[in-house]
Image (cartoon, grey):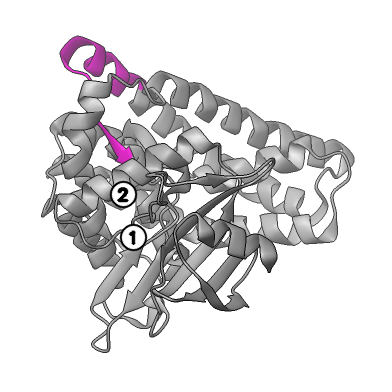
Amino acid sequence: MEWIRHILYEYDLTLSAIEAEGHHVWKVQTNRGMFRLSRQMEAEEQLVFTSGWLQRLRQSGIRSVIPYSVTKYGESVVSSADSRYILQPWIQPVCSVRDVSGWERQLMRQLGRIHQASAAAAREAGTIGLTPSVVQKRWLDGMNAVRELAHQYTRHQKGGAFGLLVCESESYVISLVERAVERLGHTISNLIADEKLPHVLCHGRLRSHYVLVAGQDRRHLYLTGFERAGYDGAVRDLTVCVRHCGDDVDWNVRLGRRWLAAYEAERQLSEAERQLLSCYLLYPEPMMRAAKSCLDTAKVGRSEMGRWMHIWRRHLPRLFAMQQFAFEIIEK
């Protein structure tokens, strides 16, 4: 506890009580209220970047983010020999976000606001981000991993029960991936000729796990987990959010329309971004990652096997609806 007192001293705070709230997270009661203290694995430079953006978003009127507290020396991160710590006001959740009707649309709207508010700064920073051509290379690697895993299962039973799943659905999955890769190639050609995609501040992993619900009316959503945020194309961030939120509900095309409409209520996608979003949604990235992980693993454990099978079985039935939605986006 003494080391926590030392950290709080940097903020001119006196510790009254402490409670562990998870892995490297503590709820601390101080002479000036309740705070969330967390140990971070990210580099100090990255955390300072995030801190600056959270403060900037709050100043622009976006109240759904929680800024880092600043020490008496004006610093947003307290560093020791091998650890970094951040302090934030404590937000007491009143329920799980999944218990809030329409939470996904609220989340998409907040994401649109963050992207809209950060577009100018990202443009000034001149960041490159992950270019579509690099994405295309990764997709080809994923497609080859599925083919190779199916081949190795046929010859050597590579991957066991998961390898069998992949083998049984290989042709269907590969047909969608090939279509996504081909369309991405056309989109890249058009981008080179016409325009550069705008970059924004991207959360990178937004999902229900990073949303807190506050207020007795359960109407206040707070977005957390920005520690890895950075500048990148808005469509990649939107795709990740759609895919992760789809894991929490029985996703269908109707929900996809509502979520996209909520996002575009705050930030309208350009025609080029619509083309790219359609490609990204066509590509079943979680399934490709699972296949590649299995292929690269010499000895597959039971827990890994179960996790890969869960991913494959969860996403496979959704591919047809996602394909419908992807085509609908560019036909609008």
- Crowd tier of the residue under label 1, counting other residues whose Cα lies within 10 Å: few below 14, some 14–19, many 20 or above: many
Tell me which label, 2 or 1, sits earlier in the chain.
2
Secondary structure under tag 1 reads loop
Q: Residue at x 21, y 39 (%)?
A: 118
Question: Which x, y percent locates residue 87?
Answer: 46, 59
State the residue in front, 307 or 57. Answer: 57
Relative to 163, does residue 223 appear above or below in the rendering? Answer: below
Task: Tell me if residue 12 is in the magenta stretch.
Answer: no
Q: Residue at x 39, y 43 (%)?
A: 50
The disc at residue 267 is: none
Q: Residue at x 16, y 14 (%)?
A: 194
Q: Quadrant of the N terminus?
A: bottom right
Q: Residue at x 41, y 26 (%)?
A: 130
Q: Which residue is mark 2?
A: 54
Query: Residues in magenta?
Result: 185-201
Amino acid type at image mark 2:
Leu
Relative to 272, does residue 51 appear above or below in the rendering? Answer: below
- Which image quarter: residue 288? top right
Question: Which x, y percent locates residue 97?
Answer: 38, 76
Q: Which residue is mark 1?
A: 66
- Which image quarter: residue 105? bottom left
Cα distance in 3D space between marks 2 and 1: 7 Å
Residues at circles 2 and 1 in contact by the CB criterion of under 8 Å: yes
Secondary structure under tag 2 reads helix
Number of marks in picture:
2
Amino acid type at image mark 1:
Ile
